[in-house]
Amino acid sequence: MKQLALLFSHKLTSDQKKDIEKNLKVDTLYNLPDNLQKLWSQVPTHQDLDFNEYLEEIKIFLSRSLVEGDYLLIQGDFGATYHMVNFAKEQGFVPITSVNKRVSKEKIEEGIVKKYSEFKHECFREYH
């Protein structure tokens, strides 16, 4: 039985859900509880943030929910992501990211550049 926890700031797409089922063969999917999701989605911007302390409650939740070999999908603030990838490896979890194809379009209207991007899930990739 494989499990997957999401350290993610948005909802999974249908393509991601299909890939999880087909290729990762995950039985149980964990979202963070609301209070922890808020911590992950709104990482403070001050320079001296101690990630170890700031992310402690999330690490406790994950340590209680996952076992060695389970997946942890990590995407978000670069510093927090780096910290949690290292944490996942230390715990024996498998840290992964969603690889997306990006299609961007730009349009200039009245001197303003407007940019529109679409992201399409391609696969999951393990952080090494």
Image: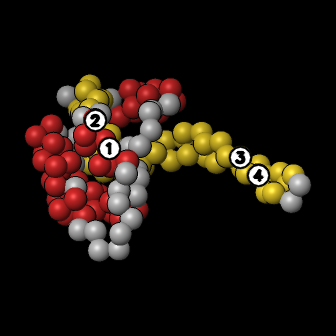
Q: CA distance from mark 2 to mark 4?
A: 33 Å
Residue visible at 71% across and 46% down in the picture = 116
**Secondary structure under the numbered disc 4 in the rendered image:** strand
Residue identifier under label 3: 116
Q: Please provide percent x and percent y for residue 106.
A: 79, 52
Instruction: Please indicate whether residue 58 sits to the left or right of residue 41 in the image.
Output: left
Question: How far across and down, in percent of the image, does residue 25 sit?
Answer: 32, 29
Kind of residue sitting beneath label 1? Lys
Residue at the image position 65 percent from the left and 42 percent from the top? 118
Say what amino acid the circle numbered 2 marks: Asp
Residue placed under numbered mark 4 in the picture = 114
Q: Callout 1 environment at 10 Å: few (<14), some (14 to 19), or many (20+)?
A: few
Name the quadrant containing residue 62. Answer: top left
Circles 1 and 2: CB distance less than 8 Å? Answer: yes
How far, Cα to Cα, is label 1 from label 4?
29 Å
Position of the N terminus by quadrant: top left
| Residue on which the image places disc 2 | 34
Residue farthest to the right, as pictured: 110
Tell me if I can see residue 89 in this picture: no
Q: Nearer the viewer, mark 3 or mark 1?
A: 1
Position of residue 92 in the picture relative to residue 5 (left or right): left
